[in-house]
Every structure is written in C-alpha cells, then in structure tokens.
Image: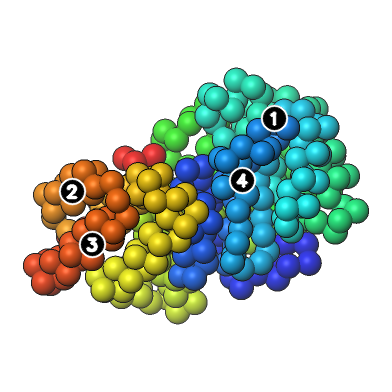
Amino acid sequence: MHIGAFILPNALFVAPMAGVTDRPFRKLCKRLGAGYAVSEMITSRPDLQCSLKTARRANHEGEAAPIAVQIAGTDAAMMADAARLNIDRGAQIIDINMGCPAKKVCNKWAGSALMQDPALALHIVQAVVAACTPHGVAVTLKMRTGWSAEQRNAPALALAAEDAGVQMITVHGRTREQGYRGQAEHDTVALVKSRLRIPVVANGDIDSPQVAREVLRRSGADALMIGRAAQGRPWIFREIAHFLASGELLAPPSLSEVKTWLLEHLLDHYQLYGESGGVRSARKHLGWYAQSLPLPAAAVQQFRARINALTDAEAQLRCVSESFDHWDSAYASHPHPPQDWRMAA
Ligand SMILES: Cc1cc2nc3c(=O)[nH]c(=O)nc-3n(C[C@H](O)[C@H](O)[C@H](O)COP(=O)(O)O)c2cc1C
C-alpha cells in the first residue's frame, strides 16, 4: 500500500475524528498496528490558523511519517493557502475533507456538503493539487457515497478527482443524509474501486477482524479505515492485522498491557493540552477504554463517576492505575463482551 511516494507498513488506517484522533491517540494507534493516520480536520479559514485549537490539531511532534493533515473548507483559494501553510508546518500529505456531515461544517458548504456541488468540489481539488504538486506533496480525498440515496455520486466525483491528480480516495459507505444512521454499505466503494487506478480505502462500521475481512472482500479496496471502533481500543489494528495475515484471532490484550498503554496515552495527552484541559479532555478516552474492556457495566459506571470528579493529573493517573489493578484481580477471569461502541457516536 502506498500514497504517492510513501510506502505504508500496512493497509489499516485510523479515521480522522475531530476531538479524538489527536497526536497522542494517532501515535498510540500507529504503535499498536495502524499503518497510517490523518490529523483531525483543520479549518482553512485564515483567521483561525493561529488559534490554539488549530495549533493542537496541527501538532505532529514525534509522530512517524508520513505526516498527513486533513483540511476542510469551501473556498478553493483558501483551501490552497491552507494546504501550503500546512506543508510549511510539516505536512507530507494533504487530505481534503468531503465526508464530514456536521451541520457546523455543512452549513458553510464544507465537508460532505461539497458532494452536492461537484463543480465546486472539483475546483477545490484542482486548487489544492496545484498548491501541493510543486512541493511533491500528495493530495488525498475523503468522501461519502453521495449527498443522498438519490445522489450517490461518489464514483463520478472520485474519477474526476483522480483525473485532477488526487492520489488516494477514502469512501465512507454512507450518504450525507444518513449521518451515522443505518449500516454502511461497501458496494458503492466497490464501484469506486472498479473505476479508479489510485488506491481506494473503505470506511464505515468496521469493528472487528471478521468484518474487516468481509469489507475487504466485498469492496476490493486497497485499505481499510477504522474510526469509532478504535476509540478506547487502539489495539484493534493489530488484531485486524493479525487476523488478515493468519486467519486466527489474536488473544485480547491483558489488563496490565492496556494499563501501560493508557498511562502513556494520558501523559502524552497532558503534554499536548496542559494539565487542566488535558485531565478534562482525557475523560472521554478513559470512558471508552473502560467500555471496551471485559468489565461489568456497573464497574464502568463507577469508574466514569470517579474519573469525572477528578481535576488534577496525578489523581487521574492514580485512579486509572488503582482501577486497573482492582479489575485485574476482580474481573480478569470473567470476561464480558464489550458494550456497543456505536452508541458513543
Ligand atoms: C467524533 C467523530 C469525529 C469525526 N471527525 C472527522 C473529521 O475530522 N474528518 C473526517 O473526514 N471525518 C470525521 N469523522 C468521520 C470518520 O472519519 C469516519 O468516516 C466515520 O466515523 C465512519 O467510520 P467508522 O464507522 O469506522 O467510525 C468523524 C467521526 C466521528 C465519530
């Protein structure tokens, strides 16, 4: 699997998720088997380029190459400027967001709303490719299957984007109209794949090694992108990689392994957000981790309540450490299935 000149270690990608796939989380996913990660979307608005939020989203310190930055916007010139700015800041791949269904983004005609205006979408793609090519930076595109069931225009738009110089396309198997409802379908991804020469990535509802294998089979995609199922379970990448390579399911990690990863994740998280903000924004990750472990619902609830009451890093780290030690002795031999991660979306 390659993107432009970059050969990737494998074909399992972490999906960009605003508020989730920041530098600490991407690094951990890469360490635990993801072959590629893209930043959370970064606005192309010039007035926000120096905001703290944008600076944190653009932070890739210590991350393994390639450094991929996703940009979102509606104005071709602004998107081209944003691409150049992020290249100056170290981006080696620029990804264009045409997949986000959020109202805040779509009302301004960015994200998946661009799929309703293919001429504008293509104009943006051309401008971004023109900005990146002189720097040898590849442009990729992330889209949905279309705006609505009646307007499933991903195959046509993907083909036009390939002609314009885009080097990889990811398709989330839902329309904009669906939001996150219903089930992702990968037949449209298969159609896109059948028409393109560049790598195509399938995305949507891949939450286990078995589903990963089925989506690969059904779509014929070159790679898989996993989002929500990696929340609190960044080791899903090595589980899928192992299954695809061997046909065998990898044993789940021990609680002590997860504890080590989580404590490292927290330290990196505080480093990026500072103690006060970091302790608060880490809470959602902690909840997801607890939810993905073989714990009874009451233990997860109790953990969340304890975590939500803590405001300093030392107390949060201690609570995590003590909770894992307690779970290890109390529950490790009584596995419960993980709760449904889709509820968290
Ligand atoms: C909390 C959250 C934030 C997201 N932010 C982005 C984003 O910044 N850029 C983007 O292209 N997609 C974003 N997405 C969409 C995901 O990248 C992915 O396409 C979608 O979640 C479907 O994949 P999944 O079923 O594996 O989660 C986001 C999704 C979630 C749940």
Q: From mark 4 to mark 3, how far is it between C-alphas?
A: 29 Å
**Which residue corresponds to mark 4?**
55
| Callout 4 amino acid | Ala
Q: CA distance from mark 3 to mark 2?
A: 11 Å
Q: Nearer the viewer, residue 290 or 11?
A: 290
Q: Which mark is residue 306?
A: 2
- Gap in angstroms between the C-alphas marked 4 and 1: 13 Å
| Foreground tag (3 vs 2) | 3
Residue bearing mark 3: 318
Instruction: Give the percent coordinates (x, y) of residue 251.
Output: 30, 75
**Horizontal side of residue 102 vs 221, given as left or right:** left
User: Would you say the residues marked 2 and 1 are in contact, meaning their CB atoms lie under 8 Å apart?
Assistant: no
The reply to whether dot 2 and dot 4 touch (C-beta < 8 Å) is: no
Query: Which residue is disc 1 drawn over?
Result: 47
Q: How far from the left and from the top, in percent, is residue 72?
A: 66, 36
How far separated are the C-alphas under marks 2 and 4? 31 Å
Amino acid type, residue under disc 3 in the picture: Arg
- Mark 3 close to ligand 1, CB under 8 Å: no
Residue 11 in sight here? no
Q: Look at 86% across and 56% down and name the residue there.
A: 135
| Of pointers 2 and 1, the one earlier in the residue sequence | 1
Indicate the secondary structure of the residue bearing disc 1. helix
In primary-sequence order, the first of circles 3 and 1 is 1
Type of residue at label 2? Arg
Name the quadrant containing residue 51: top right
Give the x, y percent position of residue 4: 78, 62
Report the quarter where the N terminus lies: bottom right
The answer to whether the residue labelled 4 contacts the one labelled 3, judged by CB atoms less than 8 Å apart, is: no
